[in-house]
Image (cartoon, rainbow, N blue to C red):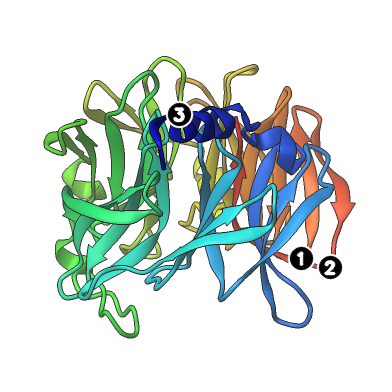
């Protein structure tokens, strides 16, 4: 092509409108679900629980992450996963299907860099469960470009810290059999939260006190002041009662106690977590306990609400939206839980807020 023709084509291409999240209906949330026929879907939902789009998944999904600019979502398989599906939510088409390299397994979560150029995926080395972050070039068809160590065993959730490209990784501490997920090291596990710099180096690691070393750090919620709230799952003696909320601040972890009766209701298991910046409330769910527990921004216990198999949760307005495995989408505020919509879907573990 001659220079004049090339420049004309370049200008024409740059003049084409770029699709944004408004072209996908401006969904408030993403959530994985299973229908009555056993098929799996990624759903885009409004703040009131209406479905804007439903895109098929090849197997059970877990969490998802959204590109900061383009209407692209990455849906992650339930760990130990073999796929991460990149979906154009405006056109309803699959862009790419990512597979971990040999000897690696996806662990259900991921996040984009601030500019959307790189996708980071939570992974483990199958033998031994050493943590890795996979790096994928989002501008080059999601080509894998490297990996970083996470500073621990069994990473799960990963978030990008506010106004930064530093990442915070919840290393759950559990080594699992690569085939059947048998837990191999409960007696010696050492979970941590690791802060990883934009250069890929582990900048700091924070661990729980020794008596809570079997409290697996799992899911994260970012607070606007730079702190991070973490939901945990107790792997120790089932007769013990331990806090399931931990706050990370300045590379230190502080467990947040609640009354014993309220902790018993959680059945030693927190499945998901969210923070509402309007109310300063932290909410964590327990599908095993059928409860949603609310704390203030300093970790103080506020209330427990009952909802069978509640797990997915995200902030909305002055409260939260909660999804459960029985198909209900509910609103939660200080007045309690109220159903917004009943669906024929079994909602999976997470409700991912966009924006």
Q: Closer to the camera: disc 2 or disc 3?
A: 3
Q: Using residue 322 as the reference point, say whether residue 228 is left or right of it.
A: left
Q: Position of residue 23 (x, y in %)?
A: 73, 38
Q: Closer to the camera: disc 1 or disc 3?
A: 3
Q: Are marks 1 and 2 in contact (CB under 8 Å)?
A: no
Q: Which element type, helix, strand or loop, lies under badge 1? A: loop
Distance CA(mark 1)–CA(mark 2): 8 Å
Residue 291 image label: none
Q: Position of residue 52 (x, y in %)?
A: 80, 49
The residue that disc 2 covers is 344
Quarter containing the N terminus: top left
Q: Using residue 26 as the reference point, say whether residue 176 is left or right of it.
A: left
| Closer-to-camera residue (162/228) | 162
- Residue at point 19% right, 53% down? 146
Give above or below for 157 relative to 348: above
Q: Are marks 1 and 3 in contact (CB under 8 Å)?
A: no
Give residue 184's quadrant in the image.
Answer: bottom left
| Disc on the earlier residue, 2 or 3 | 3
Q: Which element type, helix, strand or loop, lies under badge 3? A: helix
Residue 326 image label: 1
Q: Position of residue 347 (x, y in %)?
A: 69, 61
| Closer-to-camera residue (286/352) | 352
| Closer-to-camera residue (228/159) | 159
| Disc on the earlier residue, 1 or 3 | 3
Residue 4 image label: 3
Distance CA(mark 2)–CA(mark 3): 57 Å
Q: Using residue 149 as the reference point, say whether residue 271 is left or right of it.
A: right
């Amino acid at each position: 092509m001659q220079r004049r023709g090339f420049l004309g084509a370049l200008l024409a291409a740059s003049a084409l409108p770029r699709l944004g999240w408004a072209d996908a209906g401006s969904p408030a949330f993403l959530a994985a679900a299973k229908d009555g026929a056993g098929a799996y879907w990624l759903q885009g939902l409004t703040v009131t629980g209406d479905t804007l789009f439903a895109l098929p998944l090849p197997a059970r999904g877990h969490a998802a992450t959204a590109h900061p600019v383009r209407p692209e979502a990455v849906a992650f398989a339930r760990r130990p996963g073999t796929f991460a599906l990149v979906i154009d939510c405006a056109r309803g088409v699959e862009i790419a299907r990512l597979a971990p390299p040999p000897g690696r397994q996806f662990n259900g979560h991921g996040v984009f860099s601030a500019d959307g150029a790189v996708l980071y995926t939570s992974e483990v080395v199958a033998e031994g469960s050493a943590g890795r972050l996979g790096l994928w070039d989002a501008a080059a068809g999601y080509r894998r470009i490297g990996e970083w160590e996470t500073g621990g065993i069994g990473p799960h959730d990963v978030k990008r810290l506010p106004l930064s490209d530093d990442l915070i990784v919840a290393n759950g501490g559990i080594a699992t059999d690569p085939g059947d997920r048998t837990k191999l090291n409960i007696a010696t596990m050492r979970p941590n939260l690791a802060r990883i710099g934009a250069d890929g180096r582990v900048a700091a690691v924070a661990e729980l006190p020794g008596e809570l070393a079997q409290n697996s750090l799992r899911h994260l919620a970012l607070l606007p002041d730079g702190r991070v709230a973490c939901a945990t799952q107790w792997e120790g003696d089932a007769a013990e009662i331990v806090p399931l909320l931990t706050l990370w601040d300045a590379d230190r972890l502080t467990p947040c106690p609640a009354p014993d009766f309220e902790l018993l209701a959680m059945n030693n298991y927190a499945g998901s977590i969210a923070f509402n910046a309007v109310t300063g409330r932290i909410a964590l769910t327990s599908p095993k306990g059928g409860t949603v527990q609310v704390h203030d921004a300093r970790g103080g216990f506020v209330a427990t609400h009952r909802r069978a198999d509640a797990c997915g949760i995200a902030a909305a307005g002055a409260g939260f939206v909660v999804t459960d495995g029985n198909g209900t989408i509910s609103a939660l505020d200080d007045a309690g839980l109220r159903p917004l919509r009943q669906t024929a879907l079994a909602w999976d573990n997470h409700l991912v807020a966009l924006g």
